[in-house]
Image: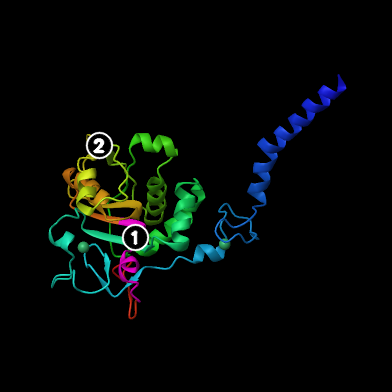
Amino acid sequence: MPDAFRRSAEKGFRGFVDLVVSPLFSLIFPDDCRLCGEALREVSRVPVCAKCLREPQPLVAEYFCVACRTPFVNAFPLDESGRCTLCRLGLTGFDAVYSYGSYEGSLRKLIHLFKFEKIHTLAAPLGKFLAQALPREQQFDAIVPMPLHWTRRWERGFNQSELLAREIGRRWNVPVKKAVRRVKPTAPQAGLTNAKRRANVSGAFRPRRGLQLNGKRVLLVDDVMTTGATAAACARALKRAGASHVALLAVARTDRRAALTGFEMASAVHVGSNT
Ligand SMILES: [Zn+2]
Ligand SMILES: [Zn+2]
């Protein structure tokens, strides 16, 4: 039966193309930038063009909290020492926050490609943003990725914060330690008030047994900081394990100023880092 033979041979060939040849070709000849759609001219493991990778800019603000660096439209929420209400009340749990840009535009798209479309190679360019946000004079004994609950990790197949933590660990030559576990599969935080977010994540993290962080300076790494409630709960677990200082480093943070007033940032300064 030559016809049936031909059909199965064709099927086999197509299967071979789909399984082996196509992925190989897309590896060597990448097609279009996943952000702007322009054809990629250079051979790269990252499916985003150089122009789009250069686009995310550091977050700028005229008024911001000196401790958590939350940007504000005016000085009203800040006390005489320059701290916001959450920091004044000791509700943040961490000692400092460093982040690169605002969670919008091209930076948001890059994080989505990385996290939800699982383009792991984006860890390198995103890690570069992390490195730019972290002041050189800061020193850390351990870098800790923000843990995912095992069910979420299983769903996603990887922990995006872990890949980012490894990038910064490699650049700064600091060991990466999975020091905390997420023991509670927390409901999504979106749409919750600040107080509800804190209640939602309280008790969600536990330091790993036998872990000694006594007197250690720890850098907690996450992809996005929203209100900081999740990071605060994780920072408290690290402090329970003995850490003396916990700083949070995130690629992006949500900036509510535009949503509040559409305020034009006139004489803005860079708040991504101390320097
Ligand atoms: Zn592009
Ligand atoms: Zn603050």
Residue 65 higher or lower than 122, as above or below: below
Query: Magenta segment, which residues?
Result: 249-264
Instruction: State the residue at coordinates (40%, 43%).
Output: 159
Residue 141, compared with residue 49, is above or below; it is above
Q: Residue furthest top?
A: 1
| Residue under label 2 | 208
Q: Nearer the viewer, residue 95 or 170?
A: 95
Would you place residue 249 above or below residue 185 in this image? below
Identity, as a three-letter code, of the amino acid under mark 2: Arg
- Say whether residue 215 is left or right of residue 247: left
In front of the other: 254 or 221: 254
Toward the bottom, the furthest residue is 267
* Upstream in sequence: badge 1 or badge 2: 2
Q: Nearer the viewer, residue 145 or 142?
A: 145
Query: Which secondary structure lies at badge 1?
Result: loop
Residue 182 lies, in percent from the top left, at 28, 39
Residue 252 quadrant: bottom left
Give the amino acid type for the residue marked by disc 1 in the picture: Thr
Residue 254's label in the rendered image is 1
Q: Quadrant of the C terminus?
A: bottom left
